[in-house]
Every structure is written in structure tokens, then in C-alpha cells.
Image: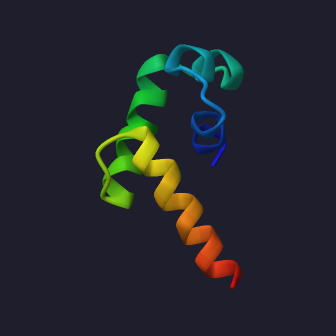
Amino acid sequence: MEVLTLIGEGFSTKRIAQELFISINTVETHRRHLLEKMEVKNSVELIRQVTRAMWLNAS
């Protein structure tokens, strides 16, 4: 969730790694898993899908 939140805030992979004290490779792995899980191709689509899912669950 932390990686997803920082992606949504527009942070770069390098900045996310610095903020969370993890390696760039770890951030890239988390990002890849999120993209696969949500069945999207990029971070913009990821945030759109997550936002849509959260909005639907709140209804």
C-alpha cells in the first residue's frame, strides 16, 4: 500500500525507494506485481483502476 500511495503521488521509483528505505529493484518488483494484479499496463491505468475499485467499494 505504501508503494501504491507513493506511485499515486507521482513519486519516481528512485524516490519511492529512498522514502521507504528499500532498493529500487524492490520498488520495481512491487510495481510489477501491482500492475499484474490489476491487469493494467502502466502506472496511470493502475491508479485509475485502484481509484475506481475504491469508489465502487465505498458505494
Residue 40 higher or lower than 27, as above or below: below
Q: Residue furthest bottom?
A: 59
Quarter assignment of residue 2: top right
- Looking at the rendered structure, the number of numbered marks drawn on it comes to 0
Q: Position of residue 43 (x, y in %)?
A: 43, 39
Image quarter hosting the C terminus: bottom right
Q: Residue at x 65, y 42 (%)?
A: 5
Q: Residue at x 47, y 18 (%)?
A: 24
Q: Nearer the viewer, residue 1 or 41?
A: 41
Q: Position of residue 30 (x, y in %)?
A: 45, 39
Residue 22 higher or lower than 56, as above or below: above
Residue 39 higher or lower than 4, as above or below: below
Left of 31 or right of it: where is 7?
right
Q: Residue at x 39, y 35 (%)?
A: 29
Q: Position of residue 35 (x, y in %)?
A: 36, 48
Q: Residue at x 35, y 40 (%)?
A: 42
Quarter assignment of residue 28: top left
Left of 33 or right of it: where is 54?
right
Quarter assignment of residue 14: top right
Residue 9 higher or lower than 37, as above or below: above
